[in-house]
Image (cartoon, coloured by chain):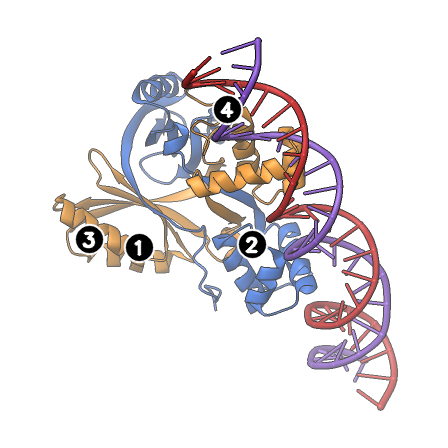
Chain colours: A orange, B blue, C purple, D red
Amino acid sequence: MRAHLDSVDWKILAELQRDGRMTNVELSRRVGISAPPCLRRVRTLEEQGLIQGYRALLDEKRLGYDLMSFAMVHLISQAEIDLDAFQRRIDQWPLVRGAWMLSGDVDFIMLCVAPDLRTFQSFVLEITATPNVRNVRTALTLKQAKNAPIVPLEGAPPTG
Amino acid sequence: MRAHLDSVDWKILAELQRDGRMTNVELSRRVGISAPPCLRRVRTLEEQGLIQGYRALLDEKRLGYDLMSFAMVHLISQAEIDLDAFQRRIDQWPLVRGAWMLSGDVDFIMLCVAPDLRTFQSFVLEITATPNVRNVRTALTLKQAKNAPIVPLEGAPPTG
DNA sequence: ACCCGTTGCGCAATAATATTGCGTTGCACC
DNA sequence: GGTGCAACGCAATATTATTGCGCAACGGGT
C-alpha cells in the first residue's frame, strides 16, 4: 500500500469530495490517468479509511426539518466514564446530527434538527433531564452560511 | 412532478444518505421497485433539489487537518448589509467548513479545520481583524462524538 | 552498470450497471 | 365505462466497472 499520497490521490479526494457520485471514467479523465488504475486508487483510499464513505446531501428544510439548532451542554462530571456515558446517550438521539467534545467552558456541542420548535423544546428538556447534565444552552440557527466539503483540498497537501 | 414524497422516495433518500454510491440496481432492490423507475425517481429528487449532491466523506485527521475548532463570532453591526458582507468573507476562508448565522448572543458560529494550532491561531487573528468583528471566541474540539447523516430518516416522514 | 523484485500504468476483454423506448396497468375524473 | 395521466416493469442498448495481463519505471544490492 502506498505510504504517501501523491498528487493524483489528492485530486481524486478533491473530486470525490465535490461530487461523490462521479463515474470512475469521468474521475480518471479529470485526474489524468486511465480508468483501471484510477479505480484501484479509489478502492485503496477506501480500504485505508481515508475515504470513509459517501453521502447524499439532502435539503433538510424541505424534508420537514425546518429547525436547526446548536445545543451546548455542560456536564457535572468530566470523568472519562461519564463522558463516555454521555456520548452513548448522544448516539441514541436521532435529532442530533453531529456532536463534538470540546475543550474549555462547554463540554459538548451538538448540532440538532427538528421539525418544529415544540419538538425541539421537548428535546431540550430531555437533554436537561439526562443524568450528569448541569445545563444546556441553545442557539437556533437562522441560516446556514456555508457548507463546504469536509477538507479544503486545492490540489496540494496542507503539509507540503 | 410528484407533489408529495411517497414511502419509496423516503427509502431512497435514507439509503442514499447512508451510502451515496450505492448502485441503482442495489438501491432499487432495497426500496422494492425495478431499476428504471428507481433511477427516474432519483433524478427527479435531484432536479427538485431534495438531493443537493453527493460527497465523499474524508478522514480529515489523517489528511493533515489535526485540528477542528468552533469559532463563535460577535459582530458590531447586525444590519443586513453587514451580515451579507461577513458571509461573503466566510466564503473566502478555506479553513471554514461550515458556518451558521445564529439567533441570540452569538452572530455566527463557524466550524474550522487547520493543520496545526499555529495555523489556527493566525487564522483567528485574521477573523478578529475583519471589519465589523467585535470578538471571536474559540472552542477546540477534542473529539467528534457523532457524525450522523444529515436528516434522520427511519422510513417515515417527520410530519406524518 | 546490471539484475531483479516491486509498483503502478494502460490496453483489451468481460461483467455489471445505467439509460432509453415502449407497452401495460392502476387510478382519478369526468 | 371511457379517457388521460402517472408510474410501473420488461427488454434492448449504451455506458461504466472490473479483471487479467504484459510493459515500463524505479530502487536496492551486487
Please state which of the two labelled residues, at mark 4 or mark 3, is closer to the viewer.
Answer: 3
- The disc at residue B59 is none
Residue A91 is labelled as: 1
- Quarter-wise, where is residue B7 in the image? bottom right
C-alpha distance separating marks 4 and 1: 34 Å
Q: Secondary structure at mark 1?
A: helix
Q: Is residue B35 left or right of residue B95?
A: right
Which chain contains the residue that carries disc 3?
A
Which chain is mark 1 on? Answer: A
Residue D21 place in picture, x, y as percent: 65, 41
Q: Residues within 10 Å of mark 2 (few under 14, many from 20)?
A: some
The residue type indicated by label 1 comes to Asp
Helix, strand or loop status at disc 2: loop
Q: Which circle's residue, 3 or 1, is located before the other in the chain?
A: 3
Judging by the rendered image, the residue that carries numbered circle 2 is B22
Query: Dot 2 falls on which chain?
Result: B
> Which amino acid type is shown beneath numbered disc 3?
Ala
- Taking B160 as reference, is B43 above or below it? above
Q: Which residue is mark 3?
A: A85
Q: Is residue A103 above or below residue B17?
A: above
Question: Quarter holding the C terminus of chain A?
Answer: top left
Using a 10 Å C-alpha cutoff, classify the residue at mark 4 as few (fewer than 14 neighbours), some (14 to 19) or many (20 or more): few
* Quarter of the view holding residue A118: bottom left
Identified by mark 4, the residue type is Gln
Residue occupying the point 19% across, 53% down: A85
Foreground mark, 2 or 4? 2
Same-subunit check for callouts 1 and 2: no
